Amino acid sequence: MNEHRLRQEMVRFAHLLYERRLLVAMDGNLSALLPSGDVLCTRAGCHKGLLTDDDLLVVDRSGRVLRGSGRPTSELQMHLACYEARPDVRAVIHAHPPVSVAFTLANVSMARCVLPEVVLTLGTVPTAPYATTGSADLADRVREAIRAHDAVLLDRHGAVTVGPDLLTAFCNLETVEHTATITKAARDLGGARELPAEEAVRLRAMGLKRYGGPPEAVARADDPGADLPEACLACSGCASRDPGGIGPRLDLKMARVTERPIPTLGEALAAAPERRSLEDAVVAAVLESLGGG
């Protein structure tokens, strides 16, 4: 893809990230490789919802600015680390999807096998340990995690997704946040059931062969557990509701809507005939509250 077309795509996907609430204000950054091997990236301190062509810079693989005004994104080291670790990657997106970030704050792992379509296309989504934003330490941790995954959560900080193009990287980010939203809803309703281990492995092996993925992962497609983590193979959080799993059972308090106010015991006694005993009044009040009186 030529530079003009790539610039148009980067502006478009930056706007979509903002519109889909995957980032706000000056959050996030995007990059993609040009045919020359240089990197087109967003500059530091620009609003992605208002991004224009003037907010894009071209840098070489060492981070030196070749064209454009301003400084490149402060997370440029992280983007360059992804390209170094994965020669198949040509686009990187970093954003702050809110539900996914909340999972890292709550110390709930998304490296679990819950939704079939996600296991098929992404496998699982690991969380890289915390490191200061923009630091070499963070870049190193992303480099290590991205070798075998197309999507990685950053503890307290957001998500990084990669792909052969910006569309794929964007789709991977949407999938991560969609998965987090569904999983949270399931947990709120009482627990998220994970896929049986055999089905998870079957789906993942099929996905790696059909859709591809990180070269390290594709090479393991025929392994007994494919590239899935032990958590998916042991299913620690589905049947046992182990607190360490993704779906511990929660104590829910349910509310009920009634057509008219439920009388208090005092109101029931006041309304009861004098000959009615206290026991009768209590029973009547209970029946009334249940809709049977």
Image: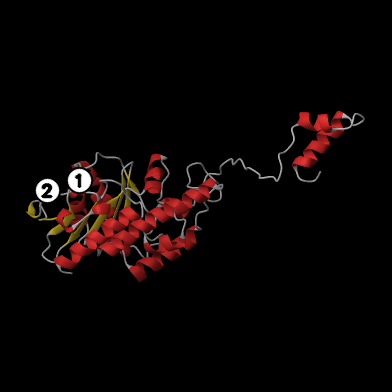
Residue at 24 percent across and 53 percent down: it is 50
> Is 147 situated left or right of 197 in this image?
left
Which residue lies under the disc numbered 2? 70
> Is 73 situated left or right of 102 in this image?
left
The N terminus, quarter of image: bottom left
Residue at 30 percent across and 50 percent down: it is 95
Residue 63: percent from the left, percent from the top? 11, 51
Residue 23: percent from the left, percent from the top? 31, 49
Residue 293: percent from the left, percent from the top? 81, 43
Upstream in the sequence, badge 2 or badge 1?
1
Residue 67 location, quadrant:
bottom left
Q: Is any atom of residue 65 visible in this view?
A: yes
Q: Nearer the viewer, residue 160 or 2?
A: 2
Residue 68 location, quadrant:
bottom left
> Is 110 situated left or right of 42 in this image?
right
Which of the labelled discs sits on residue 45, or is there none?
1
Residue at 10 percent across and 51 percent down: it is 69
Q: Nearer the viewer, residue 273 or 256?
A: 273
> Disc 1 on helix, strand or loop?
loop
> Mark 2 is on which residue type?
Gly
> What's the colour scheme?
secondary structure
Residue 16: percent from the left, percent from the top? 31, 58
Crowding near pointer 2: few (<14 within 10 Å), some, many (20+)? some
> Mark 1 is on which residue type?
Gly
Asked if the residue under mark 1 is in contact with the one under mark 2, i.e. CB atoms within 8 Å, the reply is yes
Q: Nearer the viewer, residue 57 or 25?
A: 25
Q: Is any atom of residue 124 visible in this view?
A: no
Q: Taking 170 as reference, is 139 above or below it?
A: above
Q: CA distance from mark 2 to mark 1?
A: 9 Å
